[in-house]
Amino acid sequence: MAEILVLDDVLDATVLVGKILGKKGHTVHTFTDEDEAIAFVGKQAVDLAILDIKLQKMSGVEVLAELKKIRPEIQAIMLTGYPTVETAREAISLGADEYCVKPIDRQELEDKVEKVLKGKSRKTALNI
Amino acid sequence: MDFREINLARARMYHFLSAMFRDEVPEALLEKMSSGVFFDQLLVLQDSCSIQDFCSGLGRITGYLKSKSAAAAYKELRHDYAELFLNAGKNPAFPYESCYQNRDPLVMQEAVASVRKAYRGAGVHKSESYADLDDHIAVELEFMRYLAEKAADGNDQNSQFDFLRNHLMGWSVDFCAVLTGATSSDFYRGLAELTMSFLFNERMYSFAALAQQEAAPAYLHVLEQMSKAIAGLGLEKGYTLIAEGAAPVAANRSVKTHCYICLGLCGQEVTLKDGIITGCKGLSGDPKGGGRLCVKGANAHANTYSAYRLKSPLIKENGRFRKASWQEALDLTASRLKAMDPETVAFHRGNDFNMWCHEGVMAAFGTPHKTTHRQMCDNPARMANEKNYSEKRPWIDYANSKFILLFGINELSTSAGQRKVALLKKAVKDGAKLVVVDPRRCDSAEIATEWIAIKPGTDGAMAMGMCYVIVSEQLHDLEFIDNWTYGFEAFKKRLLGEEDGIARTPEWAAEICGVPASTIARLAREFAAASPNAGANSWTGVAQTPNTVHATQALMALNALMGCYDAPGGPALVRKFKLASPWADGQPKPPNNASKTKLNKSHLWSGWIPGYFEEDVKAGRLKAMLCYFGNPVMSSGSEPSMQRGMEGLEFACAIDCYMTNTTALCDVILPDSTYLEQSRVVADWMYESFISLGQKAIEPMYESKTVVEIFSELAARWGYAEFFPWKSEDEYMANQLRNQKISLEELKEVGYFVTDPQEFYKYKVWGSVNPPAGYGASGSSSTGKYNFINPVAEEKGIDGLPDYKSPYEDWPQLQPDEEYPMILGYFRVLEHEHTSTFHNIALMKQQGTNPVWINYVDAKRLGIADGDQVILTSPWEQLKARARVTWDIREGVLAAAGGFGGKYGLEGDPKYPQFSGFNTNHLLPPNVACKWSGTPPLKYIKTRITKA
């Protein structure tokens, strides 16, 4: 089972994702604050980060960049309610494994997380 | 809109996007898009659209179409299309789902099996008339159109959403993001935004539809308006990329063939599932590979399935490539070449795949200037062996050897999959002594009993010192020398200094080569003690340094002095049971219209020497080139000089699988097939004589053609169609096998056929070192014996005896000096084959860059640390590299893996910055080649290294 970090500025969203993945046996660490999430990754190994792109202080893409600096091996699923090719480009350039649009249903979330953790979709960062 | 209208509107949108991606956008369609209903409707929608990227995409597309005429847009977009989707550019946007599973540039992966399953489920298949792949975005979009139209008719609703979620949504984000980053065209950037936005909204629509809720009004508005706009384009009613009827699943099978990724021809078994290559393994029992493959052979299909493959003919216009039909590209190539004096046309071929065909065609065309990789590879070794003995590369019978002496030949990297290397390793493990002479501790040196870190280019001196010891101490095999050699007395005089007063003693040699005299003498005595079960051999580590014909003769003379030739454990005599002609009895053979003109002359070898390419072009001696499977710009000499030569040609055409530093400089490129897509038979040898089948595993991909097809088409345009009449590969292969004891059908089942077992001392039976009638080898000895004196030199009246010849008399500019004190060269690595594997992601992941090796002591003196960026400067050029500080290279020597420095493929693609290297040949002097053999000094470049 994996250590998963969830970061969303909406507390309910983090709780919901935490519940879904917690039931699958993962240890989920939820955050609404970017700095706290980054500091956490500095202290503890995390396998997967699920990051909302629209946050309060930073963008999810910026957070991903910070997390990759600390732990280059960390895998990431980006979530957004406002998909644009620009944010997709940034996320992919930083090595995000998946770029998903909200709302994401339970099954889809479980599938994506499993796929990413099993390494089936371990993806190369593309400099685009 | 009601349910049916919504689905039809969605289908129309899918139809439109599919039409945008499936090929170049036709001028007539651009004309319709630039005006009338479509354009007006798009402007209306722009004002009322509230979906962010969709609006932005529309704005970019309309802005682009408004900015120029349809004709101008068509012209420009053709180039964009070729660069983005046909791999004519450095930063392509691969339009295949397979490429985004792991973001590796590989096609025909699991995604294809998965989309085929979906197509079968819906009772359709990718249309045979569409030469692109099943998971191309245009095919998937058209399939969605199909499903949406079915849904509009009240049929299954869910399968479209399953396909959307499991396929398009899973990769279209990556694709659109890549396309946006890759293109400088507002048209394609707009299209990327439009596509991604549409698909995201489709996803939201699917949620609503599945929950039986109303779709978002903003999206319905977009659909309604776009549907009206697209209706104005008059797109075809039927399906273009998919066809009715589920395609049957092709049975699992395996194909027995021979690996040609390094041209080494190890037996290979290719496994296929539903017609897709899933793996390559060694062919059990095969004489060449012995059931083994190296990492290159095991990943050979990643060359075939590289997403960087060239897919259709390309023609350059105003400096950029565009797609062309075969007819147009072949007509242009044939007419441009035909209009030239054949004596000004060069034919460069990098391999020998069905060479009887392309050589036959080019001989009929009439150019005398043909070259292979020979001149840049190992011509000195060939010159030293093929007339002195009867074979250019007399491989040592490692299995029975007690003492193996390798000069500049790194078998463990260059021939890793071959059976001989397994035998070499076993011999060493069982106690044979392996001595590797190389300035660098190469892979073979790693397992050697002794690594002799010799000064580059001085192997001839060391070998002469060894020969001196053997002769002066009378250790040599008098019986062999008396009966089976020619010129010994002259050689002895040379060794003992009776000619010029300089005895080639170990002390004399040590001064030159930097190997202690005592070591040279000891190795000579050990070699003699182990003889005749001993062998000495060399390859490009010697051949690509200056003046090494005589050096190679010197080291090969060790075998002759000790009677090792064709002894158990010695260099073997080669015999290949010849194939019959591809032309059947009575079939007319093409004329040879080539004159005997020799473009360039060296002391021993004359012909076209690409090392002098720039000079020949400048002087008007060469005006055009046809280049088949080769990258002479990177490999045949100074790269900047070769490039200037190419730029000076009036016309150049390349036949290749990929865009390269050479093809990019051509006017026309014809897409070649990889060896897994075409067939041939060859007579081969690996101790045994055997027939080796190269059997195609799949049909040529995309619009590529086999080399026989391409050259036959050129021949037809030059009026020689009757001489190249074969309707199938089987036809000429059956002709070639008509003198064998095995039929083509039987050979296809087994892959190889041994005609003659391994035997020793064959020359005693033959009465000559030349194989008997019916057999071939790569050379022949005019005396029937081993010649200490090179017969070609003897005939010309020049020095033909083994020796060390200082290069500086001929090439003073090569001598290291205070300003450029070090010697730089390239080496081969197991993971790559010259320049031809740099589009292969599996191999690039193994070895994706090439640091320059520098000795620890040198590095410390120069303040260079491991990993530092350094500047390499020769008197001719300068470049940057990373340093690898190591004890495994002689002081004063620099080396880096060869083949790197491509401007296209994984090295050139900005998406993969982790893959990049440099070409050591960049630093070579221009217009230079060995005065004796024509080989450029690729491993002897005087250089200065400084910390960047």
Image: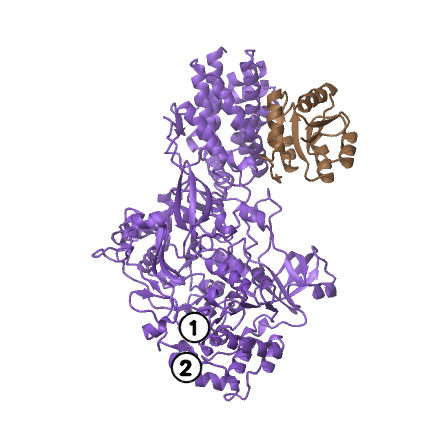
Chain colours: A brown, B purple
**Residue B290 in view here:** yes
- Pick the front one: B502 or A21: A21
Q: Chain of mark 2?
A: B
Percent x, y of residue B257: 39, 49
Q: Is residue B377 left or right of residue B355?
A: right
Residue type at mark 1: give it: Tyr
Q: Residues within 10 Å of mark 1 (few under 14, many from 20)?
A: many
Residue type at mark 2: give it: Glu
Q: Residues within 10 Å of mark 2 (few under 14, many from 20)?
A: few
Residue B506 vs B346, above or below: the answer is below
Percent x, y of residue B650: 43, 56
Whether discs 1 and 2 lie on one chain: the answer is: yes
Percent x, y of residue B320: 49, 45
Q: Which mark is residue B479?
A: 2
Under circle 2, the secondary element is helix
Q: Chain of mark 1?
A: B
**Residue B486 in view here:** no
In the image, farthest residue toward the front: B430
User: Which residue carries the number 1 mark?
Assistant: B565
Q: Is residue A113 left or right of residue B621?
A: right
Name the quarter where the C terminus of chain B is drawn. bottom right
- Give whichever of discs 1 and 2 has the lower sequence position: 2
Percent x, y of residue B448: 58, 65
Q: Is residue B885 left or right of residue B346?
A: right
In the image, farthest residue toward the left: B586
Under circle 1, the secondary element is loop
Q: Which mark is residue A12?
A: none
